[in-house]
Amino acid sequence: MLLQSTLTSLRKLPLTCFEADSRKVLPGSIFVCSQGLNHDSHHFVDEAVARGAIGLIATRPVDTRLPCFVMPGHAMSISLISHYYQNPQRQLFNIGVTGTNGKTTVAYSLHKILNQTSPSAYTGTLGCEFDGHQGELINTTPDAITLLNLMKRMVDKGVTHHVMEVSSHALDQDRVSCMDYDITIFTNLGEDHIDYHGSRDDYLQAKLRLADRLKPDGFAIINLDDPMAMAIMDRCQQKSRILTYSTQNPEASLYADPVSASCQGAEFQLHYQGSAYKVSTPLPFQFNVENSLAILAPLLATGQEPEQAINYLKYLSPVPGRCEVISLGNGATAIVDYAHNHDALSGLIRHVRQHTNGHVLTVIGVTGDRLMDAEVIGRCCSQLSDHSFFTTDNPMGLEPDTILASMCRQAISNKITIEANRERAIALALSRFSQQKHSNDVLLVCGKGPETWQYTSIDKLQSEPYAGDKAVIETYARAGGLLL
Ligand SMILES: CC(=O)N[C@H]1[C@@H](OP(=O)(O)OP(=O)(O)OC[C@H]2O[C@@H](n3ccc(=O)[nH]c3=O)[C@H](O)[C@@H]2O)O[C@H](CO)[C@@H](O)[C@@H]1O[C@H](C)C(=O)N[C@@H](C)C(=O)N[C@H](CCC(=O)O)C(=O)O
Ligand SMILES: Nc1ncnc2c1ncn2[C@@H]1O[C@H](COP(=O)(O)OP(=O)(O)OP(=O)(O)O)[C@@H](O)[C@H]1O
């Protein structure tokens, strides 16, 4: 009743969209108030009104001259908005990808493949992409209201498929409560975000919530090599169809063996439904074989011919800032990568080591919201690399020196150089290459991927521009005669 009568009233307003953040309200928006972890946005109504809001949705009466629709809880507000937009999520084929590492690689690649035959959208760490347009997002997984606004636009633009990354924070904060997924993909569970979730088990519990959002006839795609595989299968069992993938277990629905992987890409034999297929992909290193299986699985599950799916993988374009390889003139290589947690960094450095007899240099910073991880990351990089350059990566309100001091605490002191300015840190690392002939050396520039900003505040609304790791590498490599 309440929902219906509010919908009728809302439809009489000339509203343009719904907005959860008073600082982003545009004229014509309806401002949706809620209680967050730090703020109660019912207190930000004045700002929303000043910015041109034409109405409010709140969970308690708010003193204003604008129409205010009071809902019994935030979940009901989300449901109202979903109904207003005629449930855009139900008009899309939704694929949700979760896991500690690999979400962006899998989700973005899948989007690029699907987009070749059906209009597809991507939301995740790289922002939002559909209908030839790209937009930035504050979060990997947007809040429910932003998500509904985006999906409404997708549907209006004729998009049929939507591949999205689903973070553990989003699952914990009910950002995807409006979603029902046709396919869910679980890549892996590593050591991450314990600062937020409190324990590894709570982190796992958050990830498992994605299984609850899978449609009864949906497909759950699960990495059988990951210790969380059984827990996910248990959570899915009652209702869904399960496809597993593995590089170790021939019992998996998709099994890759043997595998050869390097900086240039990977090749493997895919075993699927009793047949074997030769697969090659430009995605480098062993962990991208796992990602390749996670990309192939939904294609096969939805009836794509194996030969066609494999062909898509072969011609995949690089994922921005994920293992992007830049060949330098003296035989050395620079790699721009997004690895920023212990598992991804140690995995990446070890994989690079397997494929070079040269030196491995690493440029790395730790973001202000991960200060707890700084010591471990500093130690790991200094132990595994020949030399590391500790620098700045999104200080988010902390003094870069505070973060750098933490990074140094357990690092091997004669194997690190500290340079807070990221551009100078990269230039310093590259200067080692240009001083002498260092064939086969590899420079890893980690943690920022394609980002062209440094967040200076925790709310991510304040940032300083940054040229971007790839551009900085190219500029200094060119100046040092390492690139034409
Ligand atoms: C710790 C955390 O997850 N915080 C998220 C959370 O913020 P919060 O609950 O503290 O929000 P709040 O400050 O209390 O504000 C409550 C409400 O008031 C609004 N507000 C707030 C201030 C104001 O001036 N005006 C205003 O209207 C806010 O928009 C919000 O709707 O809810 C917000 C809205 O959904 C998120 O944007 C915010 O993400 C912050 C920016 C963030 O950095 N989160 C990270 C930890 C995160 O979520 N990361 C994952 C990816 C992790 C990974 O895999 O690497 C992600 O999905 O992005
Ligand atoms: N399957 C994987 N297993 C381990 N490491 C991986 C895997 N896939 C990618 N990585 C490493 O982790 C980095 C981040 O990858 P990607 O951006 O795809 O993951 P993500 O889950 O989206 O990360 P984030 O949540 O931090 O954005 C890569 O740049 C690579 O070094």
Image (cartoon, rainbow, N blue to C red):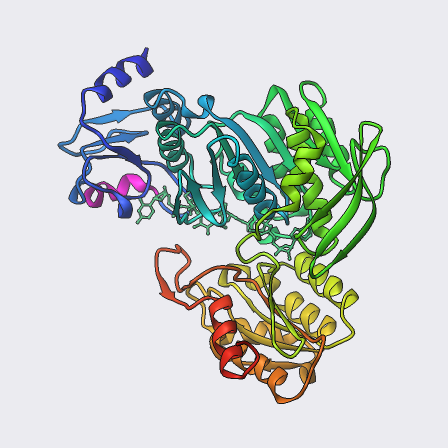
Q: Nearer the viewer, residue 148 or 469?
A: 469
In which quarter of the view is residue 49 placed? top left
Q: Position of residue 273 (x, y in %)?
A: 80, 27
Residue at (34, 42) in percent of width and height: 40
Magenta span: helix, strand or loop, mainly?
helix
Q: Is residue 345 magenta?
A: no
Q: Position of residue 38 (x, y in %)?
A: 40, 48
Which residue is the extreme one toward the top? 1
Q: Is residue 234 left or right of residue 39?
A: right
Which residue is the extreme one toward the bottom? 435
Query: What segment carries the magenta color?
Result: 40-48
Q: Position of residue 114 (x, y in %)?
A: 55, 35
Residue at (51, 78) in percent of width and height: 478
219 shown above or below 440: above
Q: Nearer the viewer, residue 247 or 390?
A: 247
67 shown above or below 430: above
308 shown above or below 169: above
Q: Is residue 182 visible?
A: yes
Q: Position of residue 257 (x, y in %)?
A: 84, 44
Q: Is residue 51 left or right of residue 459?
A: left
Q: Nearer the viewer, residue 350 or 176?
A: 350
In which quarter of the view is residue 67 placed? top left
299 shown above or below 168: above
Q: Is residue 47 magenta?
A: yes
Q: Is residue 458 left or right of residue 378?
A: left
Quarter of the figure that contains the N terminus:
top left
In which quarter of the view is residue 36 placed? top left
Residue at (66, 40) in percent of width and height: 311
Q: Is residue 166 visible?
A: no
